[in-house]
Amino acid sequence: MLILMGTPDPGFLEYLMSLRDDARLLADDLVGLRRELHADPELGRALPRTQRRVLAALDGLPLEVAVGTELSSVTAVLRGARPGPTVLLRADMDALPVTEDTDTDLPFASRNAGVMHACGHDLHTAMLVGAARLLADRRDALAGSVVFMFQPDEEGTDGGGAEQMLAEGLLDVSGERPVAAYALHVAANRLPRGLFASRPGTATAASDGLEVTFRGRGGHGSAPHKALDPIPALCEAVTALQTFVTRRFDVFDPVVLTVGAIRGGTKANVIPGDASFSATVRTFSPTARTLMRQGTAVLIENIAAAHGLTARVDYRLGYPSTVNDAAEVTLAADTVTGLFGPGRYFSAPHPTPGAEDMAFVLNQIPGAYLMLGACPPDRDPDTAPYNHSPQAVFDDAVLPDGAAFLAQAAAARLALAGAGAGAGAGAGAGAKAGTKAGTKAEPGGRPRPARAPKADA
């Protein structure tokens, strides 16, 4: 059966329609699972109740299932009827330390105080379960294996989950390294419901942390000359960092630095002995990331020295940029169009300044990370609350389409490898971009998303 998207034959169109229809038949089950997960969210690497629900949802399928040792991950392998390569599909499962706003009036709102699925990972988990069911039903048509990666701690509550799953042998579970990996992430705003979006090259920022402490000598507020006041130096450093960002970095390879917390002093007439601040740093290329890490230390230490102080600079590397393979993005875009028709895929002109630990997977194997609009139809995507907001609401009407996309992307990639062609062959998008299969585009453009076209699930 032809799986590529160039000029599909009638049998292929019938196959796509059956996949889409079968996904819609799963809607009630997927919605039920998603709402169970939403009502009982868990944080970090330890997600025992979430893990049990995923295992129960996969029970009875022809899968080789394993769980993590240092985290509550679930890894499942579906082996096709014929030998072939391996493709990986990923969903994150953890929630956020956010108190859900009761004004959303969701009957399945979080029952756990201070914990909420405010980033849509409950939808991701349900979609991947749906993809596993769809592909299990089509096992006889598959030449190769599919790995289903159910990951805890994408939010980094306990340091991140993708790296730990990789350390526990994720890429070897099928017996051979995957040739490609795909993941979806829902958006509560920016994208209309049902619109898929991605881009070749840099898709998300790298996210690092900056912790700075200035140490001086405390004293009385009436006699600052007898003290070494850290407060003015701290204020100077906060503004100097913004100047550093605008003067030392290419506007087309941007940096975002936000100081989110400042600590120092207890009383108006007391000069403290130390003061500190915390910042998040977002970069879009390894070059900018390295310069930011080195340059902030030099800048802050010299400001401290000018004031007779010392400074401790702790630049904490977090998630790297998520970099999509151009050919895999072409295959993903063609999959969306083949399943749902034109107008359902949006080629994002810029990366997003958000960060994502799918980056660690895509640093090792080529793949594509896509966004999927899940803004409810009664909300304006331009003004709806953002992911991570206590008011964020995700429409679970997108679950069948997300499951169908993941299943078909895996099936298409396996068929493509079996045909002995390069990913995206015949689709033309890679050729238009002037990018060879397997290469990665350079980062560029401002990290502000353009207005997306309308779509619906």
Image (cartoon, helix red, strand yellow):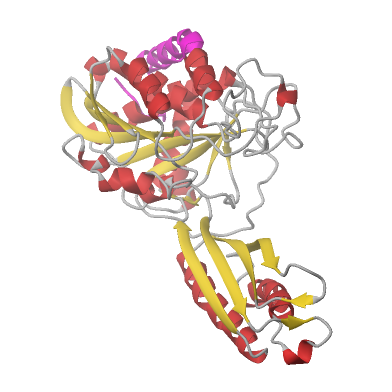
Taking 75 as reference, is 432 above or below it? below
**Is the C terminus in the top left, top right, bottom left or bottom right quadrant?**
top right
Q: Nearer the viewer, residue 52 or 225?
A: 225
Q: Is residue 62 left or right of residue 108?
A: left
Kindly give the residue lying farthest to the right in the view shown: 222
Q: Which corner quadrant of the image does residue 138 belong to? A: top left
Taking 319 as reference, is 417 above or below it? above
Q: Which corner quadrant of the image does residue 65 belong to? A: top left
Is residue 151 something one can see in this rendering?
Answer: yes
Question: Whole-percent x and y of residue 78?
Answer: 24, 24
Taking 131 as reference, is 353 above or below it? below
Say whether residue 91 is magenta: no
Q: Is residue 89 left or right of residue 338?
A: left
Which SS does the magenta portion mostly show? helix
Is residue 255 something one can see in this rendering?
Answer: no
Question: Whole-percent x and y of residue 56?
Answer: 34, 16
Q: Magenta span covers which residues?
A: 1-29
The number of callouts visible is: 0
**Is the N terminus in the top left, top right, bottom left or bottom right quadrant?**
top left
Question: Whole-percent x and y of residue 197?
Answer: 56, 37
Question: Whole-percent x and y of residue 128?
Answer: 41, 25
Name the residue: 18% across, 31% down: 84
Q: Nearer the viewer, residue 456 or 69?
A: 69
Say whether residue 17 is magenta: yes
Name the residue: 53% across, 76% down: 312
Name the residue: 60% across, 51% down: 350
Q: Which corner quadrant of the image does residue 119 belong to? A: top right
Name the residue: 18% across, 19% down: 81
Q: Is residue 86 left or right of residue 375?
A: left
